[in-house]
Amino acid sequence: MFAVILQQFPSGLTGGSSESMPYYVYILSNKPNGTLYIGRTDDLIKRVWQHKEKLIKSFTSKYDLDKLVYFEILDDAATMVWRERRLKTWLRDWKVALIEEKNPNWDDLYEGIAGSTCIEMGPLVKPEGH
């Protein structure tokens, strides 16, 4: 499942040595067809980790939304903001269809992007072979 999503977004998961920083729009849930949260960030691994650890008291911590079920990689901040706002206006059925098109089992994609790398270790790079 994760490999399919990465193949669609080959630019990588972090800025690393690339010239342009990637930006992300992501969807979290607590279970298949559960409550949805749409967010944006320039560091997907760190931001999802913050949700998982409930470091920020918010909607996601209140409803235990810590499963990364969908994300998109975008090239610039303006597009990221536009896309997040656009997705937030979508009907729930459209959001569910978007998730299920790439992640029909609603798997948590976090482990696939974070691997065993500890966030505090510094900049993360796309795993080899993906």
Image (tube, helix red, strand yellow):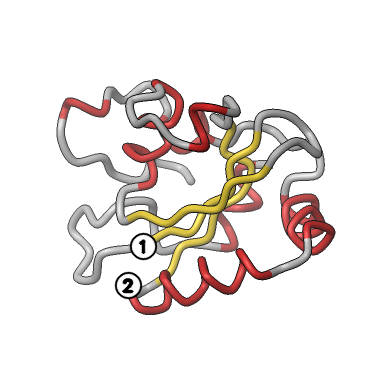
Report x, y in % for residue 126. 36, 45
Query: Disc 2 marks which amino acid?
Result: Ala
Mark 2 to mark 1 CA distance (whole Å): 6 Å
Q: In the drawing, what numbered circle is on residue 23?
A: 1
Residue 92 in the figure: left or right of residue 119: right
Secondary structure category for the residue under label 2: helix
Report x, y in % for residue 116. 38, 21
**Residue nearer the viewer, 41 or 109:** 41
Query: Disc 1 marks which amino acid?
Result: Tyr
- 130, above or below 85, in the image: above
Report x, y in % for residue 93. 84, 59
- 46, above or below 77, in the image: above
Q: Does the residue at mark 2 contact the one at mark 1 (Cβ under 8 Å)?
A: yes
Q: In the drawing, what numbered circle is on residue 77?
A: 2
Residue 40 in the figure: left or right of residue 125: right
Sequence-first disc among 2 and 1: 1
